[in-house]
Amino acid sequence: MNTFLKILLTALAVILLSNILPGVAISGYLSAIIVAVVIALLNMFVRPLLVFFTLPATLVTFGLFLFVINAIIILLADKLVDGFSVSGFFAALFFSILLSIFRSFLFSLFKEKK
C-alpha cells in the first residue's frame, strides 16, 4: 500500500475519532490531512528517540509505556498543527489507542494479496 493512501486513511480515522471523542477537535479535512502527515513524520523521526531513551521504563512496564509515547506524539501533533486540538493527556492517550485500532482495521481492508 502506498504512502499517500495510508495518509488519507489516517486522515479519515482522525476525522472519525474527532467526531466521536469529546476531547479531540479538528477544524477541517485539510487539517486532518496535515495531522496525518505530522503524525507520520513524528512516528518516523521522534518516536524512535523516545523509545530509545525510555527503554528501561518500557521494559519494566512490559511495553505498556509505548502507549504513553504514542500519547506524547499526539500531544506534539496538537502543538504543531493549527486546527487540531486535544484537551489533555488522557484524551491523547485514548485517541492514540483508538487511532491505532482504526488504522489497523482500515489498512487491513486495503491490504494487497500476495
Image (cartoon, helix red, strand yellow):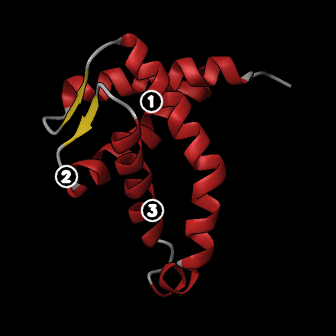
Quarter holding residue 20: top left
Q: Percent from the top left, x then y, of residue 78? A: 34, 41
What's the CA distance linking mark 1 and mark 2?
17 Å
Report the number of numbered marks: 3
Identity of the residue drawn at 50% across and 27% down: 10
Image position of 72 (left or right of 66):
left
At label 2, counting other C-alpha atoms closer than 10 Å, the crowd grade (few under 14, some 14-19, many 20 or more) is few
At label 1, counting other C-alpha atoms closer than 10 Å, the crowd grade (few under 14, some 14-19, many 20 or more) is many
Image position of 34 (left or right of 4):
left
Quarter holding residue 2: top right
The residue identified by callout 2 is 88
The residue identified by callout 3 is 69
Q: Percent from the top left, x then y, of residue 70? A: 44, 55
Q: Element type at marker 2?
A: loop
What's the CA distance linking mark 3 and mark 1?
17 Å
What's the CA distance linking mark 3 and mark 2?
14 Å
Q: Percent from the top left, x then y, of residue 6? A: 61, 24
The residue identified by callout 1 is 35
Residue flagged by tag 3: what amino acid is it? Ile
Q: Earlier in the sequence, mark 3 or mark 2?
A: 3
